Image (cartoon, rainbow, N blue to C red):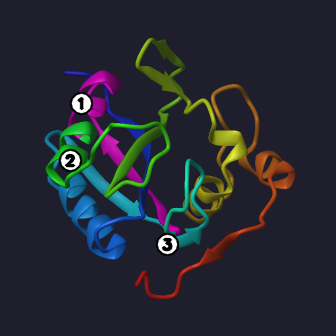
Amino acid sequence: MSAEATAFIAIGSNLGNPRRQVDRAIAALAKLPDSQLVAVSPWYRSAAIGPGEQPDYLNGVAELHTRLPARLLLAALQSIEQAQGRQRNQRWAARTLDLDILLYGDQVVTEPDLTVPHPRLAERNFVLYPLADLVPTLVLPNGTPLTELLAKCESGGIVRDSDGE
């Protein structure tokens, strides 16, 4: 069993009633073994990044205390995605659910299918804003304060969602 780590999980959906998808994802995260769901950020709407015309995304971040190693956490997140109808046919395509490990304690992981911190964390306002709602004083494993990333990131196109509908 691993030592407990604080993991931050990005949650996004733009298909199949996004609010229902993210609510189901939160419920599934709360049931993960050897883990405790600690907090969930407010939800944000943002334009989709990817091919073709897509509906806007509903995005947020969950804070999870877990003893699951990063690799097992990734497998659990992918199982939740699959259970909610996630199709992996095209990169950045519209999806029912997208769960990504943003941070896993202060660990840096570089494997073929797992990179932590998330490789595009610094350029994605739709994860930086909800992450800052949870932990405004957060410092990344490389010593960069979250506030510095926010200062460099464009806020255009992201809107705090009042009801997630």
Between 42 and 63, the one lying in front of the other is 42
The question of residue 73 being in magenta is answered with yes
What crowding class fits label 2: few (fewer than 14 Cα within 10 Å), some (14-19), or many (20 or more)? many
For numbered disc 2, what is the local secondary structure? Answer: helix
Mark 1 to mark 3: distance in Å? 24 Å
What crowding class fits label 1: few (fewer than 14 Cα within 10 Å), some (14-19), or many (20 or more)? few
- The first of marks 1 and 2 along the sequence is 1
Amino acid on which disc 3 is placed: Trp
Residue 140 as seen in the image, left or right of residue 114: right
- For the view shown, which residue lies furthest in the top direction? 111
Amino acid on which disc 2 is placed: Ile
- The first of marks 3 and 2 along the sequence is 3
Residue appearing at x 21%, y 57% in the figure: 30
Residue appearing at x 68%, y 56% in the figure: 125
Q: Which quadrant is home to the C terminus?
A: bottom left
- The first of marks 1 and 3 along the sequence is 3
Amino acid on which disc 1 is placed: Ala
Looking at the rendered structure, which numbered label has been put on residue 43?
3
Mark 3 to mark 2: distance in Å? 19 Å
Looking at the rendered structure, which numbered label has been put on residue 49?
none
Q: Which residue is mark 2?
A: 80
Residue 72: quadrant of the picture: top left
Relative height, residue 88 to residue 31 (above, below): above
Looking at the rendered structure, which numbered label has been put on residue 75?
1
Residue 12 as seen in the image, left or right of residue 88: right
- For the view shown, which residue lies furthest in the front direction? 52
Q: Are circles 1 and 3 on residues that touch, CB within 8 Å? A: no
Q: Which quadrant is home to the N terminus?
A: top left
Which region of the structure is painted magenta?
A: 56-76
Between 108 and 153, the one lying in front of the other is 153
